[in-house]
Amino acid sequence: MYTVSVRDHLMVAHSFRGEVFGPAQRLHGATYVVDVEFRRAALDASGIVVDIGKAGDVLRTVLGELNFRNLDDDPAFTGQNTTTEFLARVIFDRVAGALGRGELGAGGADIESLKVTLHESHVAWAAYEGGIK
Amino acid sequence: MYTVSVRDHLMVAHSFRGEVFGPAQRLHGATYVVDVEFRRAALDASGIVVDIGKAGDVLRTVLGELNFRNLDDDPAFTGQNTTTEFLARVIFDRVAGALGRGELGAGGADIESLKVTLHESHVAWAAYEGGIK
Amino acid sequence: MYTVSVRDHLMVAHSFRGEVFGPAQRLHGATYVVDVEFRRAALDASGIVVDIGKAGDVLRTVLGELNFRNLDDDPAFTGQNTTTEFLARVIFDRVAGALGRGELGAGGADIESLKVTLHESHVAWAAYEGGIK
Amino acid sequence: MYTVSVRDHLMVAHSFRGEVFGPAQRLHGATYVVDVEFRRAALDASGIVVDIGKAGDVLRTVLGELNFRNLDDDPAFTGQNTTTEFLARVIFDRVAGALGRGELGAGGADIESLKVTLHESHVAWAAYEGGIK
Amino acid sequence: MYTVSVRDHLMVAHSFRGEVFGPAQRLHGATYVVDVEFRRAALDASGIVVDIGKAGDVLRTVLGELNFRNLDDDPAFTGQNTTTEFLARVIFDRVAGALGRGELGAGGADIESLKVTLHESHVAWAAYEGGIK
Amino acid sequence: MYTVSVRDHLMVAHSFRGEVFGPAQRLHGATYVVDVEFRRAALDASGIVVDIGKAGDVLRTVLGELNFRNLDDDPAFTGQNTTTEFLARVIFDRVAGALGRGELGAGGADIESLKVTLHESHVAWAAYEGGIK
C-alpha cells in the first residue's frame, strides 16, 4: 500500500453539550492541524499516488468552509458536538466527496481509502479512516 | 474507524541483559514520550471516542506506577528486559485493564483496540497494538 | 546564561477588530501551545534554574484563568485584540507576577528574564521576552 | 503486533517528467527524513523486535547508496520519476532485501512487514508498507 | 521584545566546492523548512507585530525565486557555496528588502530585526539574524 | 550573527538530592535530545560557520563519555545534582574544550559563542549559552 499525506490547518470556535466535556461546555476554540492521507495499492504511470498540488487545493477548500468560524452557528452541525473526532469524519466525507467529483484528477478514482487526523494540541489528536465507496 | 490519542511521558532507569544490547547492558535510562490511541467503529451519543479527561487520568495513573524508578528493581519485570517494545505492551495491558474495570466510563466498553507508542528519542520509537478482548 | 522551559496549552475563542485581520474578524478560536523560558546567570545550590514542578503549576494556573473561554467576554481585554503576540505578553506579565509573589519558591527571586512563546499552528508562533524588574 | 521504528535522512537532487509536476519538472532537490518501521507478532527471547543497532546500520547503508546524488543519473531509475512515494518503495525493497540476506541478524527472519515513510517537508510525506515474503 | 514567526519551505538542488564538504561536493539537494521571525519593541495599534498574511506572502515570494531550482545555475550565486547558513542570509536580505519597500505594510517600518532559520533535516539547521538598517 | 546547529542524543540514569526534586530523588533516567548551536559573526571562505561533519563528531564524542551510564557513579559529578541545566553546562564546557583544542578545524577559532539545549521530554527542556574565551 502506498500513501501520500498533506497537512494544513483550521482555527474555529465552538462549545460542547454534555457534562463529560467539563469546562469545554463553554464557548472556546481550537487550532486543528489537519493531515489527510491518500492510499492506493499501486502508483500511476507518473509514479504518484495523487496530484499533491490538487490534494492540497482540495484540503484548503474543504477547510475554508469551516475556517475562522464559530461552528455552533453552522447549520450543518445543529444538535451535534463538533468534537475533534467528529470533525475528522466531516473532513473525511468532504475530501471523499471531492474525490468522487473528480477534483483530484483522473488518478483520484484509484484512491482506495483515506485517513484524516486532526491534532488539537501537542498532547491530543483524533482521526477517522475508512474506505472510499 | 475513529481514534483519539493522548500523550504523556515517563522517566526511568534500567539495564538490559544480552550482547545484542551493547553499551545498553549498563545501567542507563530513558524518557519515554507515550501515546495511547483508543479506537472504535462509531462515536457515542456525545460525539466522542472516549472521555479524553478520563483517558489522560488513566494514562497518568498507569505511568505513575513506573515513573521515576529503576525498572531493574520492579518485581513485575524480574528476568525480563524492559525494552521500549516490551514497555509498550506493559502499558497496553494496564490501560486495557483500566478499560475492563470501567475506569474510562461507560463508553470505554466500546473501545475495540488500542495502540501504545513509546518514543525513546528523536530517532527511535516502538509500539504495541491489539484488540481489547 | 542558564534557561529552563516548560510547555502547556490553552484553547480559546476570540475575534479581532480591524481590516488587517481579514476572516479572523469573525469569531473563531485557537489552541496555543505555550512555552515559558526562565533565565538566570547561575544555578542555585541544588543545581537548578527554578523548581520545575512549581513552574508547571504556575503556568497551569495562569493558563487556567484563560482556558476554555471566549476572550471577547473577558473584561481584562476590553477594546483590545487578543492576538498571539498580545497574549504572549499577558502570560509573561502574569508569570512575572507569580514570581514576584514568591510562588516559584525562594529561587524565583534570581530569575532575571522570561520568554513566553505561543504556537498557534505548525506554521505560525509569537513570543514576548523581557527582564524581571 | 509489535513495531520498532528508526529514523535517518537523505539529501538528493532530481527532476520529474509530466505536466502534473509543474515547477518540479525542473532539476531541484529534497531532504527526505526516512522512518522504517519493523513489525512482528511476538518479541524474541531478548524482548526485542529487531536489533536496533543493526536496523540503523542497514538503513544507513541503504540510504548511503542514494545520498548526496542526482537521482536523474542513477541507472536504477532510468525512465522513472523518483517521487517520494516511489522512493519509499525503493527503500522498502532494499531494507527487505537486507532482511532476506540476514543482515538484521537471526531475529530478522521473524519480521512480518515493514513500513517506510519519507517526510519531504513539514507539510507533506509519503509511505509504502507491505509484507515480507 | 515581541516576535512573530512564520514558516514555509523550499526544495532546491546544488553542489558545494571544497574538500570540507565531502560527498556534498556532488550535485544533491535539500528541503529547507524556513522560519522568519519579525521583531519589534512594541505592538502597533491593532495589537500586532506585523500583518501575518503579508508576512507569509512576502516569504512565499522570496522563496519562489529559489524554489524548484538548481542553485548552481543561479547567476546571483556564482562562485559561492549556497550552504544553509549562506541561504539564511540571502533570505534575510530579501525579506529585509521587502520590508524596506513597504511590502509588509506601514507597520513593517517598525520591525527592528529579523531572524531567518533554515532546517535542512531533523538533525541540522542554520540561521542568520541581524538588525534592519 | 550566523548559527549552525546539530542534534544528537544521550540516555542516562541518575538521582537527585533535595526535597525540591520530589520523586526524582529516586534513581530514574532520561533521554536528552541535545542541540549544539555554533555562532560567529561572519562565514568563512567556504561559506560555512563550522565543518558540520566535525561538529557532529565532536558532539558524538562528548556525549559518548556520558551515554548509557549511571551519572551517580561518575566521579566528575560527585556531590552534584546532574540536572538538565547542569548537564547543558557540562556539554557546553566539553564542546568548548574541543573547540579550544582545534578539533573543529581551523574555522573553530572563529566561533564566538555556543548554546547547548537539552530536551528531556516533549514538555520540558533546558539550555546553557555563553561566549568562548
Image (tube, coloured by chain):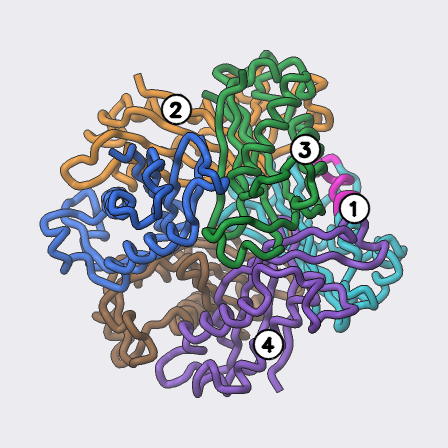
Chain colours: A orange, B green, C cyan, D blue, E brown, F purple
Chain ID at mark 2: A
Task: Measuring from the top left, give residue A78's x and y in whole percent.
Answer: 56, 15
Q: Give a yes or no on whether discs 2 and 1 share a subunit.
A: no
For mark 3, does the 10 Å Cα neighbourhood hold few (<14), some (14 to 19), or many (20 or more) residues?
A: some
For mark 1, does the 10 Å Cα neighbourhood hold few (<14), some (14 to 19), or many (20 or more) residues?
A: few
Element at label 3: helix
Q: Give the vertical position of D10 relative to E98 (above or below).
A: above
Q: Quick check: A1 left or right of A44?
A: right
In the rendered image, which residue does mark 4 sit on? F94
Residue range in magenta is C59-73
Q: Amino acid at mark 4?
A: Arg
Chain ID at mark 3: B
> D16 or C6: nearer the eye?
C6
Please say whether residue F79 is visible from this viewpoint. yes
Chain ID at mark 1: C
In the rendered image, which residue does mark 3 sit on? B62
Viewer-nearest of discs 2 and 3: 3
Viewer-nearest of discs 4 and 2: 4
Q: CA distance from mark 4 to mark 2?
A: 55 Å
Q: Give the vertical position of F80 relative to D66 (above or below).
A: below
Q: Amino acid at mark 2?
A: Arg
Q: Which mark is residue C57?
A: 1
- Residue for point 53% across, 60% down: F9
* Residue D60 found in image quarter: bottom left
In the rendered image, which residue does mark 2 sit on? A94
Q: Amino acid at mark 3?
A: Val
- Residue for point 61% across, 61% down: F69
Q: Give a yes or no on whether discs 1 and 4 share a subunit.
A: no
Task: Measuring from the top left, give residue A4's x and y in whole percent.
Answer: 32, 38
Q: Which mark is residue D110?
A: none
